[in-house]
Amino acid sequence: MRGLVLVAALAGQGAMADTVVATRTIRAQSIITAADIRLDPASVPGAHEDVAAVLGQEARIAIYPGRAVMRGHVGTPALVDRNQVVELIYSQGGLRIVTEGKALGRGAEGDRIRVMNTSSRSVLFGRIHADGSVRVAQ
């Protein structure tokens, strides 16, 4: 009976996966480079297992040396910073309005942020596009 338990426990372990680990302190909002990370032969649930998936990403929080880089701790680099002047674009049918606005939040491509139209001072929501402009719905 003991032999069966031992065999079942060993079969459940499987092969160890590699985990991406920080080599030095990575500050929040900094872009991750090859010098910042390494692979460790350990399995940490929820951590990145591929260095390529982490390189070039932005740290959402501070990551300390020796700590695993978790999936929620990195993301697409921000295109728009808070208080940055952005181009606001409204398109509906054949109508297209372009004006200047001020970002009230920080975000990456595809993120929804609040923006203020600098002409009317009205606050709107918009989605950030690859060129750094913000498309507003209303």
Image: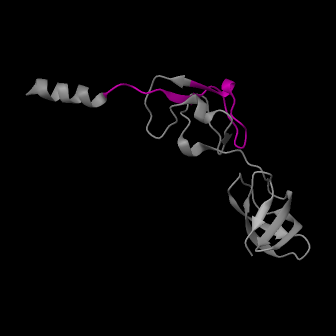
User: Seen from this angle, which residue lies furthest left?
Assistant: 1
Q: Quadrant of the C terminus?
A: bottom right
Q: How many marks?
A: 0
72 to the left or right of 91: left
State the residue in front, 116 or 6.
116
Corner quadrant of residue 67: top right
Q: Quadrant of the N terminus?
A: top left
For image coordinates 66% across by 41% down, the residue present is: 59
Residue 99 is situated, as x and y percent measured from the top left of the image, at 89, 68
Magenta: main secondary structure equals loop
83 to the left or right of 137: right
Corner quadrant of residue 34: top right
For image coordinates 79% across by 66% down, the residue present is: 115
Residue 133 is situated, as x and y percent measured from the top left of the image, at 81, 58
* For residue 107, above or below residue 96: above
* For residue 95, above or below residue 84: below
For image coordinates 78% across by 70% down, the residue present is: 91
The structure's colour scheme is one colour
Corner quadrant of residue 126: bottom right
26 to the left or right of 87: left
Residue 137 is situated, as x and y percent measured from the top left of the image, at 73, 72
Magenta span of residues = 14-38
User: Seen from this angle, which residue lies furthest front?
Assistant: 94
State the residue in front, 66 or 49.
49
Q: Is residue 113 magenta?
A: no
Residue 2 is situated, as x and y percent measured from the top left of the image, at 11, 26
